[in-house]
C-alpha cells in the first residue's frame, strides 16, 4: 500500500509538472511587434584538419573549427549538446531551444565553395559549412522558426562576376521561395557579408531571377557599408567590434555596446537592421594551437546576462524611437547563436547550462497572449 501511495504521488507530480509546463508555454507567444533572430555559424560539422594526426588524438572526431586551445583553455564554451551539431536530433533541439525563448529566425551563413570561379553545385552541397541550413529544413519542428541567408562572400569564398551572382541566386532559389523564408517588405532578405564585394550588375541579375521565380524581388542588405547605387536596399552588420588583428589587447564588453550604438543608423532610402554582438573573443582560434594561424586581436571580457539585456534593450529602444530608419518588421540580429570560436554565442553551453542569455531574449521577445 505504501508503495502504491508513493507511485501515485510520483505520477501526480509528473502530471502537474507536465501540465504546468504546457500552461507556462501557452501563456506566452512571440511578440508580433518584434522580430529577433541570430546568425547561425555552420562551423561545427565536417572533419577537423588535424584528424588522423597521432599527436592530436582530440581531433579524431572533432568538427572543422574546433581547436586544441578551445578544448584546453575555453571548455566552458562547449554547447550542452556537444561540439558537433551535424545531426537532425541536435538541430531539432536547437530549434526548440531557440523558439522557446523567442527567437524568430536563424540567419544561416552560406558559403560559395569555389572561390572566384563558377559554381560547383556538388561541392557546395557537400560542404560541411552548409550543413545546418539543410538540417534545419529537414527538421520536424522547423516551422517553429523562419530563416534567411547571409552570403559569406569573404576571403576563400568570394563570388565575382554578374554570371556567378546569378548562378548563386538560381542555386538558392528553392530556399528563397520557401514558405518559411524571412521577408522584409514582402521580399526575401539576403544579407551580403562583404558589402564591398557586392556587384550591382550581379545583384540586378539576382533580382531578375527572383522575379522570374514569382517573387517581387529580393531585399538585399550589406554588412557595414554599401549604397543603394551598389544595389543594396538595406544595411546591417554581422558583428560590431574592433581590433580584429591589431594584437592581443583586453577590452570590456561594455565597449561593444557603445560601438554598436555609434553604428545604428539608417535612412528612409536605406533602412538599417540593428545588430547586437553577444561577445567577441577569438583567442581559441589564435596561435599555434588555434585555427589557420589567425593573428592575435582585441578580446572583450566581462560579458554578463545583465549587460546583454542592457544591449538588447537599447536595440529595441532604438527601433521604437527611429521608425523612419529601420524596416517596418522591427528586425534585430544577434551575433550569434553559435560563434563559439569568436566568443559570440547565446546558445546554452557548459558555462551557461540554464541559458541565461536566452532568458534575456525571452523576456523581451515573448508577450502574454
Image (cartoon, rainbow, N blue to C red):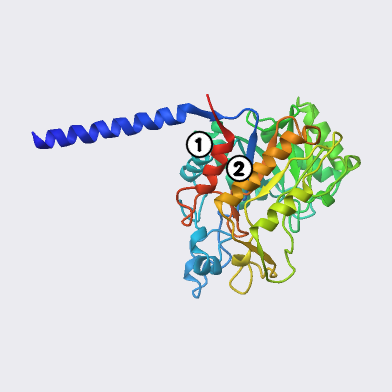
**Is residue 193 among the parts visible in the rendering?**
no
Residue 188: image location, x then y, percent: 73, 33
Residue underneath mark 1: 100
> In the picture shown, does residue 11 fall above or below 303?
above
Q: Residue at x 65, y 47 (%)?
A: 311
Q: Residue 235 falls in which quadrant of the image?
A: top right
Residue underneath mark 2: 133
Residue 164: image location, x then y, percent: 81, 45
Q: Looking at this view, is 20 or 136 the one in front?
A: 20
**Is residue 316 among the parts visible in the rendering?**
yes
Disc nearest the viewer among 1 and 2:
1
* Mark 2 burial class by Cα count in 10 Å: few <14, some 14-19, many 20+: many
* Mark 1 burial class by Cα count in 10 Å: few <14, some 14-19, many 20+: some
Residue 264: image location, x then y, percent: 77, 45
Q: Which mark is residue 210?
A: none
Image quarter of the N terminus: top left
- Whether residue 368 sits left or right of residue 224 in the image: it is left
Q: Residue at x 70, y 33 (%)?
A: 330
Q: Residue at x 58, y 57 (%)?
A: 340
- First-in-chain label (1 vs 2): 1
Residue furthest toward the left? 1
> Do tag 1 and tag 2 residues touch (Cβ < 8 Å)?
no
Q: Residue 186 falls in which quadrant of the image?
A: top right
CA gap, disc 1 and disc 2: 20 Å
Residue 307: image location, x then y, percent: 60, 51
Amino acid at each position: 500500500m505504501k508503495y502504491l501511495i508513493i507511485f501515485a504521488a510520483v505520477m501526480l507530480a509528473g502530471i502537474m509538472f507536465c501540465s504546468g509546463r504546457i500552461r507556462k508555454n501557452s501563456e506566452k507567444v512571440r511578440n508580433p511587434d518584434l522580430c529577433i533572430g541570430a546568425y547561425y555559424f555552420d562551423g561545427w560539422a565536417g572533419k577537423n584538419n588535424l584528424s588522423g594526426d597521432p599527436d592530436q588524438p582530440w581531433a579524431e572526431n572533432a568538427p572543422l573549427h574546433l581547436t586544441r586551445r578551445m578544448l584546453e583553455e575555453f571548455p566552458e564554451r562547449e554547447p550542452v549538446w556537444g561540439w558537433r551539431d551535424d545531426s537532425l536530433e541536435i538541430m531539432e533541439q536547437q530549434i526548440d531551444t531557440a523558439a522557446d525563448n523567442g527567437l524568430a529566425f536563424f540567419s544561416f551563413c552560406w558559403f560559395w565553395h569555389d572561390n572566384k570561379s563558377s559554381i560547383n553545385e556538388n561541392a557546395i552541397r557537400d560542404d560541411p559549412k552548409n550543413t545546418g541550413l539543410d538540417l534545419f529544413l529537414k527538421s520536424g519542428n522547423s516551422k517553429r522558426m523562419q530563416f534567411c541567408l547571409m552570403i559569406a562572400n569573404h576571403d576563400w569564398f568570394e563570388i565575382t562576376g554578374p554570371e556567378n551572382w546569378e548562378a548563386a541566386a538560381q542555386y538558392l532559389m528553392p530556399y528563397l521561395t520557401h514558405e518559411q523564408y524571412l521577408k522584409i517588405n514582402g521580399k526575401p532578405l539576403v544579407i551580403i557579408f562583404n558589402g564591398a564585394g557586392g556587384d550591382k550588375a550581379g545583384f540586378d541579375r539576382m533580382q531578375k531571377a527572383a522575379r522570374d521565380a514569382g517573387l517581387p524581388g529580393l531585399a538585399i542588405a550589406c554588412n557595414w557599408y554599401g549604397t543603394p547605387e551598389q544595389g543594396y536596399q538595406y544595411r546591417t552588420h554581422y558583428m560590431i567590434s574592433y581590433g580584429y588583428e591589431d594584437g592581443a589587447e583586453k577590452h570590456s564588453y561594455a565597449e561593444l555596446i557603445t560601438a554598436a550604438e555609434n553604428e545604428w543608423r539608417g535612412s528612409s532610402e536605406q533602412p538599417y537592421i540593428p545588430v547586437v554582438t553577444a561577445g567577441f573573443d577569438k583567442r581559441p582560434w589564435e596561435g599555434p594551437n588555434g585555427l589557420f594561424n589567425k593573428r592575435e586581436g582585441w578580446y572583450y571580457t566581462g560579458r554578463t546576462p545583465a549587460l546583454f539585456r542592457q544591449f538588447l534593450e537599447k536595440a529595441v529602444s532604438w527601433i521604437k524611437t527611429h521608425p523612419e530608419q529601420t524596416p517596418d518588421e522591427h528586425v534585430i540580429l544577434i551575433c550569434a547563436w553559435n560563434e563559439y570560436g569568436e566568443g559570440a554565442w547565446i546558445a546554452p553551453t557548459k558555462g551557461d547550462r540554464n541559458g541565461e542569455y536566452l532568458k534575456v531574449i525571452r523576456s523581451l521577445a515573448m508577450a502574454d497572449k
